[in-house]
Amino acid sequence: MLKKLLHSREITAFAFIVLMFWGVGMINPAFLSATNIWLCFNSSVVFTVVAIGIALVIITGEIDVSVGATLGMTATISGTMIRDGQPWHMAIIAALVVGLLIGSVNGFGVTVLKIPSIIMTLGVNGIVRGLIYVYTNGKWVENISFDFKSLSQGRLFDAITYFYLGALVLMLLVHLFLTRTKRGKYFAAVGDNIGGATLLGIPVDITKFKAFALCGILAAVGGVLYVSRVGFVTPIAGNGYEMKVIAACVLGGISLSGGVGSVIGASVGAAIMASISRVLVFVGLSSDYDNTITGILLIIIVVSDSLIRRRAVEKARRERLAAKTLHAITDGKGATHSA
Protein backbone atom coordinates (compact mmCIF):
# COMPACT_ATOMS: atom_id res chain seq x y z
CA MET A 1 0.00 0.00 0.00
CA LEU A 2 2.80 2.41 0.97
CA LYS A 3 4.81 1.48 -2.11
CA LYS A 4 1.78 2.15 -4.33
CA LEU A 5 1.24 5.51 -2.64
CA LEU A 6 4.87 6.56 -3.12
CA HIS A 7 4.71 5.69 -6.80
CA SER A 8 1.45 7.54 -7.42
CA ARG A 9 1.62 10.67 -9.58
CA GLU A 10 -0.32 12.68 -6.99
CA ILE A 11 2.44 12.32 -4.40
CA THR A 12 4.56 14.77 -6.42
CA ALA A 13 1.92 17.47 -5.99
CA PHE A 14 1.64 16.78 -2.27
CA ALA A 15 5.42 16.94 -1.91
CA PHE A 16 5.55 20.15 -3.94
CA ILE A 17 3.00 22.00 -1.82
CA VAL A 18 4.62 20.84 1.44
CA LEU A 19 8.08 21.93 0.28
CA MET A 20 6.72 25.23 -1.05
CA PHE A 21 4.99 26.06 2.23
CA TRP A 22 8.04 24.98 4.25
CA GLY A 23 10.43 26.98 2.06
CA VAL A 24 8.35 30.16 2.26
CA GLY A 25 7.96 29.60 6.00
CA MET A 26 11.73 29.55 6.36
CA ILE A 27 11.91 32.95 4.65
CA ASN A 28 8.89 34.43 6.42
CA PRO A 29 7.62 32.42 9.43
CA ALA A 30 4.32 34.35 9.37
CA PHE A 31 3.34 32.36 6.29
CA LEU A 32 3.02 29.16 8.31
CA SER A 33 0.33 30.53 10.63
CA ALA A 34 -2.83 28.39 10.71
CA THR A 35 -4.91 31.34 9.52
CA ASN A 36 -2.76 31.87 6.45
CA ILE A 37 -2.57 28.17 5.59
CA TRP A 38 -6.35 27.88 5.69
CA LEU A 39 -6.63 31.05 3.64
CA CYS A 40 -4.47 29.49 0.93
CA PHE A 41 -6.72 26.44 0.69
CA ASN A 42 -10.02 28.30 1.08
CA SER A 43 -9.07 30.76 -1.66
CA SER A 44 -8.51 27.87 -4.07
CA VAL A 45 -12.16 26.77 -4.12
CA VAL A 46 -12.96 28.21 -7.57
CA PHE A 47 -9.76 26.79 -9.08
CA THR A 48 -10.49 23.43 -7.46
CA VAL A 49 -14.01 23.08 -8.87
CA VAL A 50 -13.00 24.19 -12.37
CA ALA A 51 -9.87 22.00 -12.28
CA ILE A 52 -12.00 18.94 -11.46
CA GLY A 53 -14.11 19.68 -14.52
CA ILE A 54 -11.25 20.16 -16.95
CA ALA A 55 -9.50 17.11 -15.47
CA LEU A 56 -12.33 14.97 -16.86
CA VAL A 57 -11.64 16.36 -20.34
CA ILE A 58 -7.85 16.01 -20.13
CA ILE A 59 -8.12 12.43 -18.86
CA THR A 60 -10.02 11.56 -22.05
CA GLY A 61 -7.13 12.96 -24.09
CA GLU A 62 -8.76 16.28 -25.04
CA ILE A 63 -8.41 19.89 -23.85
CA ASP A 64 -10.81 22.73 -23.06
CA VAL A 65 -9.46 26.29 -23.12
CA SER A 66 -12.93 27.85 -22.87
CA VAL A 67 -13.44 27.21 -19.14
CA GLY A 68 -12.33 30.72 -18.19
CA ALA A 69 -14.86 32.28 -20.56
CA THR A 70 -17.55 29.87 -19.36
CA LEU A 71 -16.83 30.88 -15.78
CA GLY A 72 -17.00 34.55 -16.75
CA MET A 73 -20.30 34.19 -18.62
CA THR A 74 -22.02 32.16 -15.90
CA ALA A 75 -20.72 34.52 -13.22
CA THR A 76 -22.06 37.46 -15.22
CA ILE A 77 -25.51 35.90 -15.72
CA SER A 78 -25.94 34.67 -12.14
CA GLY A 79 -24.52 37.91 -10.72
CA THR A 80 -26.88 40.03 -12.80
CA MET A 81 -29.92 37.99 -11.76
CA ILE A 82 -29.00 38.13 -8.07
CA ARG A 83 -28.31 41.86 -8.30
CA ASP A 84 -31.72 42.40 -9.89
CA GLY A 85 -33.48 40.56 -7.06
CA GLN A 86 -34.12 37.23 -8.78
CA PRO A 87 -34.28 34.13 -6.52
CA TRP A 88 -30.86 32.64 -5.90
CA HIS A 89 -31.87 29.18 -7.03
CA MET A 90 -33.07 30.56 -10.37
CA ALA A 91 -29.74 32.36 -10.87
CA ILE A 92 -27.82 29.18 -10.06
CA ILE A 93 -29.99 27.06 -12.38
CA ALA A 94 -29.54 29.61 -15.17
CA ALA A 95 -25.76 29.48 -14.71
CA LEU A 96 -25.72 25.67 -14.77
CA VAL A 97 -27.85 25.57 -17.92
CA VAL A 98 -25.53 28.02 -19.69
CA GLY A 99 -22.49 26.02 -18.55
CA LEU A 100 -24.08 22.80 -19.81
CA LEU A 101 -24.92 24.47 -23.13
CA ILE A 102 -21.35 25.71 -23.68
CA GLY A 103 -19.91 22.35 -22.69
CA SER A 104 -22.33 20.55 -25.01
CA VAL A 105 -21.36 22.81 -27.92
CA ASN A 106 -17.72 21.95 -27.28
CA GLY A 107 -18.54 18.26 -27.04
CA PHE A 108 -20.61 18.34 -30.24
CA GLY A 109 -17.85 20.09 -32.16
CA VAL A 110 -15.20 17.61 -31.01
CA THR A 111 -17.17 14.35 -31.21
CA VAL A 112 -19.58 14.95 -34.10
CA LEU A 113 -17.88 17.56 -36.28
CA LYS A 114 -14.44 16.07 -35.45
CA ILE A 115 -12.87 19.48 -34.84
CA PRO A 116 -9.64 19.30 -32.79
CA SER A 117 -10.52 20.21 -29.21
CA ILE A 118 -7.92 22.98 -28.96
CA ILE A 119 -9.41 24.70 -32.03
CA MET A 120 -13.05 24.13 -31.07
CA THR A 121 -12.72 25.36 -27.51
CA LEU A 122 -10.50 28.26 -28.51
CA GLY A 123 -13.20 29.39 -30.94
CA VAL A 124 -15.93 28.98 -28.32
CA ASN A 125 -13.76 30.94 -25.88
CA GLY A 126 -13.68 33.89 -28.28
CA ILE A 127 -17.43 33.70 -28.94
CA VAL A 128 -18.34 33.56 -25.25
CA ARG A 129 -15.95 36.41 -24.39
CA GLY A 130 -17.63 38.53 -27.03
CA LEU A 131 -21.10 37.64 -25.73
CA ILE A 132 -20.09 38.73 -22.22
CA TYR A 133 -19.36 42.22 -23.51
CA VAL A 134 -22.63 42.27 -25.44
CA TYR A 135 -24.59 41.10 -22.39
CA THR A 136 -23.05 43.66 -20.02
CA ASN A 137 -22.32 46.47 -22.50
CA GLY A 138 -18.80 46.34 -21.12
CA LYS A 139 -19.96 47.28 -17.62
CA TRP A 140 -19.22 45.65 -14.29
CA VAL A 141 -21.87 43.65 -12.45
CA GLU A 142 -21.88 45.21 -8.99
CA ASN A 143 -24.09 45.68 -5.94
CA ILE A 144 -24.49 41.95 -5.33
CA SER A 145 -26.60 41.33 -2.24
CA PHE A 146 -24.62 41.10 0.99
CA ASP A 147 -26.43 37.92 2.02
CA PHE A 148 -25.19 36.10 -1.08
CA LYS A 149 -21.63 37.38 -0.66
CA SER A 150 -21.61 36.32 2.98
CA LEU A 151 -22.17 32.68 1.95
CA SER A 152 -18.51 32.39 1.00
CA GLN A 153 -17.46 33.44 4.50
CA GLY A 154 -19.21 30.63 6.35
CA ARG A 155 -16.66 28.41 8.08
CA LEU A 156 -16.52 25.10 9.89
CA PHE A 157 -14.65 25.39 13.21
CA ASP A 158 -13.59 28.87 12.11
CA ALA A 159 -11.12 27.25 9.69
CA ILE A 160 -12.28 25.61 6.47
CA THR A 161 -15.05 27.38 4.54
CA TYR A 162 -18.21 25.48 3.66
CA PHE A 163 -17.52 26.24 0.02
CA TYR A 164 -14.11 24.55 0.12
CA LEU A 165 -15.50 21.67 2.16
CA GLY A 166 -18.10 21.21 -0.55
CA ALA A 167 -15.36 21.26 -3.19
CA LEU A 168 -13.53 18.48 -1.34
CA VAL A 169 -16.72 16.42 -1.17
CA LEU A 170 -17.20 16.97 -4.91
CA MET A 171 -13.61 15.88 -5.52
CA LEU A 172 -14.17 12.68 -3.54
CA LEU A 173 -17.40 11.86 -5.37
CA VAL A 174 -15.85 12.41 -8.80
CA HIS A 175 -12.81 10.37 -7.78
CA LEU A 176 -15.02 7.47 -6.70
CA PHE A 177 -16.99 7.75 -9.94
CA LEU A 178 -13.83 7.58 -12.05
CA THR A 179 -12.22 4.75 -10.11
CA ARG A 180 -15.10 2.63 -8.79
CA THR A 181 -17.75 2.66 -11.52
CA LYS A 182 -17.74 1.02 -14.93
CA ARG A 183 -18.75 4.16 -16.82
CA GLY A 184 -16.33 6.26 -14.82
CA LYS A 185 -13.44 4.05 -15.87
CA TYR A 186 -14.36 4.72 -19.49
CA PHE A 187 -12.81 8.21 -19.23
CA ALA A 188 -9.29 6.93 -18.54
CA ALA A 189 -9.69 4.05 -20.98
CA VAL A 190 -10.59 6.43 -23.81
CA GLY A 191 -7.65 8.71 -23.00
CA ASP A 192 -5.18 5.85 -22.62
CA ASN A 193 -5.95 3.97 -25.84
CA ILE A 194 -8.83 5.17 -27.99
CA GLY A 195 -8.41 2.30 -30.45
CA GLY A 196 -8.45 -0.31 -27.73
CA ALA A 197 -11.42 1.35 -26.05
CA THR A 198 -13.36 1.21 -29.33
CA LEU A 199 -12.56 -2.49 -29.76
CA LEU A 200 -13.83 -3.15 -26.23
CA GLY A 201 -17.14 -1.52 -27.09
CA ILE A 202 -16.64 1.61 -25.02
CA PRO A 203 -18.71 4.53 -26.41
CA VAL A 204 -15.78 6.86 -27.10
CA ASP A 205 -17.67 9.83 -28.50
CA ILE A 206 -20.37 9.71 -25.83
CA THR A 207 -17.73 9.55 -23.10
CA LYS A 208 -15.89 12.56 -24.51
CA PHE A 209 -19.17 14.46 -24.92
CA LYS A 210 -20.01 13.78 -21.26
CA ALA A 211 -16.57 15.03 -20.24
CA PHE A 212 -17.07 18.35 -22.02
CA ALA A 213 -20.63 18.72 -20.71
CA LEU A 214 -19.55 18.06 -17.11
CA CYS A 215 -16.62 20.43 -17.56
CA GLY A 216 -19.04 23.17 -18.61
CA ILE A 217 -21.30 22.51 -15.63
CA LEU A 218 -18.43 22.62 -13.15
CA ALA A 219 -17.09 25.82 -14.76
CA ALA A 220 -20.58 27.25 -14.13
CA VAL A 221 -20.42 26.17 -10.49
CA GLY A 222 -17.08 27.95 -10.33
CA GLY A 223 -18.76 31.05 -11.81
CA VAL A 224 -21.42 31.10 -9.08
CA LEU A 225 -18.78 30.62 -6.38
CA TYR A 226 -16.77 33.45 -7.98
CA VAL A 227 -19.71 35.85 -7.62
CA SER A 228 -20.09 35.05 -3.93
CA ARG A 229 -16.37 35.24 -3.18
CA VAL A 230 -15.47 38.37 -5.17
CA GLY A 231 -18.78 40.22 -4.88
CA PHE A 232 -18.65 41.73 -8.37
CA VAL A 233 -18.04 40.58 -11.94
CA THR A 234 -15.99 42.37 -14.60
CA PRO A 235 -16.20 41.64 -18.35
CA ILE A 236 -12.82 39.90 -18.12
CA ALA A 237 -13.75 37.70 -15.15
CA GLY A 238 -12.17 34.26 -15.48
CA ASN A 239 -9.59 35.47 -18.00
CA GLY A 240 -6.46 33.32 -17.64
CA TYR A 241 -8.20 30.70 -15.49
CA GLU A 242 -7.83 28.13 -18.27
CA MET A 243 -4.04 28.24 -17.99
CA LYS A 244 -4.11 28.01 -14.21
CA VAL A 245 -6.46 25.02 -14.04
CA ILE A 246 -4.60 23.20 -16.81
CA ALA A 247 -1.38 23.84 -14.91
CA ALA A 248 -3.09 22.60 -11.74
CA CYS A 249 -4.06 19.35 -13.47
CA VAL A 250 -0.59 18.78 -14.92
CA LEU A 251 1.08 19.67 -11.63
CA GLY A 252 -1.30 17.22 -9.95
CA GLY A 253 -0.07 14.36 -12.11
CA ILE A 254 -2.59 14.34 -14.97
CA SER A 255 -0.91 13.70 -18.30
CA LEU A 256 -1.93 15.96 -21.19
CA SER A 257 -1.77 12.85 -23.37
CA GLY A 258 -4.73 11.47 -21.46
CA GLY A 259 -5.47 8.28 -19.57
CA VAL A 260 -3.33 9.07 -16.52
CA GLY A 261 -4.04 11.07 -13.37
CA SER A 262 -6.79 11.79 -10.87
CA VAL A 263 -8.96 14.65 -9.67
CA ILE A 264 -7.26 14.41 -6.26
CA GLY A 265 -4.00 15.51 -7.85
CA ALA A 266 -5.83 18.23 -9.78
CA SER A 267 -7.29 19.56 -6.52
CA VAL A 268 -3.86 19.69 -4.87
CA GLY A 269 -2.52 21.43 -7.96
CA ALA A 270 -5.35 23.97 -7.71
CA ALA A 271 -4.33 24.77 -4.13
CA ILE A 272 -0.77 25.32 -5.34
CA MET A 273 -1.89 27.64 -8.15
CA ALA A 274 -4.08 29.65 -5.75
CA SER A 275 -1.20 29.97 -3.27
CA ILE A 276 1.39 31.35 -5.67
CA SER A 277 0.22 34.98 -5.41
CA ARG A 278 0.32 34.83 -1.59
CA VAL A 279 3.70 33.12 -1.66
CA LEU A 280 5.10 35.95 -3.77
CA VAL A 281 3.85 38.55 -1.29
CA PHE A 282 5.39 36.74 1.69
CA VAL A 283 8.78 36.44 -0.02
CA GLY A 284 8.75 40.10 -0.94
CA LEU A 285 8.01 39.85 -4.66
CA SER A 286 5.25 41.44 -6.70
CA SER A 287 2.17 39.33 -7.44
CA ASP A 288 2.61 40.49 -11.05
CA TYR A 289 4.92 37.49 -11.43
CA ASP A 290 1.98 35.12 -10.81
CA ASN A 291 1.21 34.33 -14.47
CA THR A 292 4.90 34.14 -15.34
CA ILE A 293 5.54 31.52 -12.67
CA THR A 294 2.41 29.61 -13.68
CA GLY A 295 3.63 29.49 -17.28
CA ILE A 296 7.11 28.37 -16.25
CA LEU A 297 5.68 25.61 -14.04
CA LEU A 298 3.39 24.44 -16.83
CA ILE A 299 6.23 24.22 -19.37
CA ILE A 300 8.60 22.46 -16.94
CA ILE A 301 6.01 19.90 -15.89
CA VAL A 302 4.80 19.17 -19.41
CA VAL A 303 8.36 18.72 -20.69
CA SER A 304 9.19 16.47 -17.71
CA ASP A 305 6.05 14.40 -18.27
CA SER A 306 6.89 14.05 -21.96
CA LEU A 307 10.42 12.89 -21.19
CA ILE A 308 9.18 10.41 -18.58
CA ARG A 309 6.59 8.95 -20.97
CA ARG A 310 9.18 8.74 -23.77
CA ARG A 311 11.57 6.96 -21.45
CA ALA A 312 8.83 4.53 -20.38
CA VAL A 313 7.94 3.78 -24.02
CA GLU A 314 11.61 3.24 -24.91
CA LYS A 315 12.08 0.97 -21.90
CA ALA A 316 9.03 -1.10 -22.86
CA ARG A 317 10.31 -1.32 -26.45
CA ARG A 318 13.72 -2.58 -25.29
CA GLU A 319 12.08 -5.14 -23.01
CA ARG A 320 9.93 -6.44 -25.86
CA LEU A 321 13.00 -6.62 -28.12
CA ALA A 322 14.98 -8.47 -25.45
CA ALA A 323 12.12 -10.93 -24.94
CA LYS A 324 11.86 -11.59 -28.69
CA THR A 325 15.64 -12.07 -28.95
CA LEU A 326 15.66 -14.51 -26.03
CA HIS A 327 12.73 -16.41 -27.55
CA ALA A 328 14.53 -16.63 -30.90
CA ILE A 329 17.72 -17.92 -29.25
CA THR A 330 15.74 -20.49 -27.26
CA ASP A 331 13.95 -21.71 -30.38
CA GLY A 332 17.26 -21.90 -32.21
CA LYS A 333 18.83 -24.07 -29.53
CA GLY A 334 15.76 -26.30 -29.48
CA ALA A 335 15.97 -26.79 -33.24
CA THR A 336 19.71 -27.67 -33.02
CA HIS A 337 19.10 -30.30 -30.34
CA SER A 338 16.29 -31.80 -32.36
CA ALA A 339 18.60 -32.13 -35.38
Image (cartoon, rainbow, N blue to C red):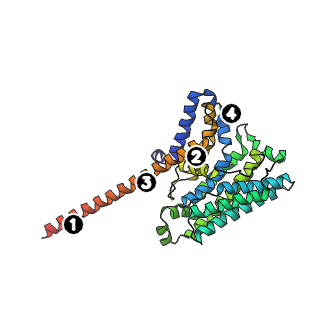
Query: Mark 2 or mark 1: which is in front?
Result: 2
Give the image location of residue 137, x and y in percent: 79, 56
In primary-sequence order, the first of circles 4 and 2 is 4
Which residue is under mark 4? 35
Which residue is under mark 3? 309
Residue type at tag 2: Gly
Secondary structure, mark 3, is helix
Secondary structure, mark 2, is helix
Which residue is under mark 2? 269
Residue type at tag 1: Asp
Q: Is residue 188 left or right of residue 227?
A: left
Query: Mark 1 or mark 3: which is in front?
Result: 3
Query: Which quadrant, please, contains the C terminus?
Result: bottom left
Secondary structure, mark 4, is helix
Query: Mark 3 or mark 4: which is in front?
Result: 3
Give the image location of residue 70, x and y in percent: 69, 57
Q: Is residue 92 left or right of residue 193?
A: right
Which image quarter: residue 292? top right
In primary-sequence order, the first of circles 1 and 3 is 3
